[in-house]
Image (spheres, rainbow, N blue to C red):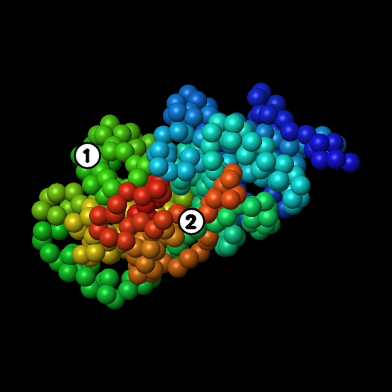
Amino acid sequence: MGEKEMFSLVEVTNSHSRKEFLEFPVRLYKNEPNWIRPIDNDIENIFNPLKNRHHDHGESIRWILKNYSGETIGRIAAFYDSTLYSPVEIPAGGIGFFECINDRQAAFMLFETAKKWLECRNLEAMDGPVNFGVRDNFWGCLVEGFHEPLHNMPYNFPYYKDLFESFGFKNYFNQYTYRAEIQGCGKIHPLIRRSAERVLKNPDYKFKLLQKGDISFARDFKTIYNKTWENFSGTDEITDNDAILLLKKLEPILDNRLVIFGYYKDEPIAFFVMIPDIGQLTKKFNGKWNLWNKLLFVWNLKISCKVDRVIGRIFGVVPEHQGKGVEGALVITFENEILKPGFPPYKSLELNWIGDFNPVMMKMSQLIGGSIYKTHVTYRYLFDQTKEFHRAPVVNTIPHPKKTEHDAHPLTANV
C-alpha cells in the first residue's frame, strides 16, 4: 500500500475540520498526565486574520492527516509574515502546532506538505515548531525536562525530537526555562547580591511595585522597553497606547507584587514583569472558556489562591545601567515582597524562554539562583540542502548589541 493510499491530507477549512484539529491532541495525550490542553480560542485566534495582525503581511494554513481508516493521526500548520525578515536574511516561514503519532512516514508527509506550501511562496527555509506570533506562546520542541508546561508553552512526546531531526531539521537554537525555588531562596550569587545591595542602599535608585490603574507605569514601561531593545533586530518601538493596552491585557491576572520597576534619579531604567502561571487553573477547563470556567478562574486565582508558580515574562534594564547590580536589585525586591507574611506563598519561579543565543541572560539566570529545568529546541530546515547551515547568532554580548539576522523577540530577549 503506497503512502497516498495509507494517508490523506485534509485542509482545515470548516467547523468540522477545525474541531478535529483541536480535538486530536486530546486523544493523542490521553494517557500523558503532564500534558495540558490549551484554551481552544487561544489557538483559533492565531489563525483568525481579524485577531492576528501577522496575517496583514502573511498567510497561514492548517492540515490534519488521516489514515486509511479515516482516523486522524497528525496535524500541522504553516505560515509566514514577510515583515519578520529583512532582505539580507534568509526568508524563513514557520510550521507549528505539529502533533503526530510515532510514525516517520506520517510525520514526513506533514513536513513535506508544509515545505511545498512555503516554497511556493518564495520562502527558503522553515522554522519549527513555532508560533504565528509571539515567541512566549506555542514555541519550540520539548527535548529535556518533561515537566508540566507553563501556560501555552509546548509539551510533546520525546519521540518528536527524532521525527524532526530524521527529516533533516537542524537545531537553530535552544530555549531554556530556568527554575528557582522562592521559599527560602536566598540563592543569588554573593557577587550579584553585594552589587545589588549597594544599589538598594543608593538613594538615587528606587524600586516600586506596579500600582494597577496608574498609567504612568505604562509610559515608564514604554521608555524602558524602547531603550533596552532599540538595537535588536525584528523589534519596533512601542507607543504609550501599546504599553497601556499590554498592561490592561495583563491586569486581570496581575499580582502587583510580581511587577517591579526600577528608577535612577526618578528616570525609569528597569522592570521585571512576572505573572502567575494560570495554566495551573486552565488545565482543568478542557479547552473551553465558558462562563462557568471564567467564574472558577477568578475564584481560584483571586480568592482561593490556587496558583503557586510564577512565570518570568519580561526582564529589561536600559543599557547604561546593565551590569551595575540593578538586575539583582530587582530580584531582591521581588524576594522581599513575595515572602512577606500574610500573603499566599508562591513556591517557584520559572524564567521562561531564555535563548542559548543570549549568554548574558543565561549567566544572569544562574547567578540569581536558577537552573535549567526544561529545554525546547527551535529547528530550521533549509530548502536548499546544499547551503551551509548556521545556528542563530549570539546577541547581547556587549552593552549595545548590534542588529543581527536573529529576530530577538521583545518578550524574550532579556528574559
Q: Is residue 28 left or right of residue 67?
A: left
Badge 1 element: helix
What residue occupies the far bottom of the structure in this picture? Answer: 190
Instruction: Identify the residue at image location x=23%, y=37%.
Output: 215
At which x and y percent is residue 284? 59, 45
Instruction: Identify the residue at image location x=66%, y=29%.
Output: 12
Q: Earlier in the sequence, mark 2 or mark 1?
A: 1
Quadrant of the rendered image containing residue 333: bottom left
Instruction: Identify the residue at image location x=47%, y=43%.
Output: 90
How far apart are the alpha carbons under marks 2 and 1? 36 Å
* Mark 1: amino acid: Arg
Label 2 crowd (10 A; few <14 / some 14-19 / many >=20)? some
Residue bearing the label numbered 1: 219
Q: Is residue 411 above or below residue 331?
A: above
> Which label lies toward us, 2 or 1?
2
Instruction: Identify the residue at image location x=64%, y=52%.
Output: 168
Q: Nearer the viewer, residue 30 or 322?
A: 322
Q: Nearer the viewer, residue 98 or 346?
A: 98
Residue bearing the label numbered 2: 391
Q: Is residue 204 left or right of residue 281?
A: left
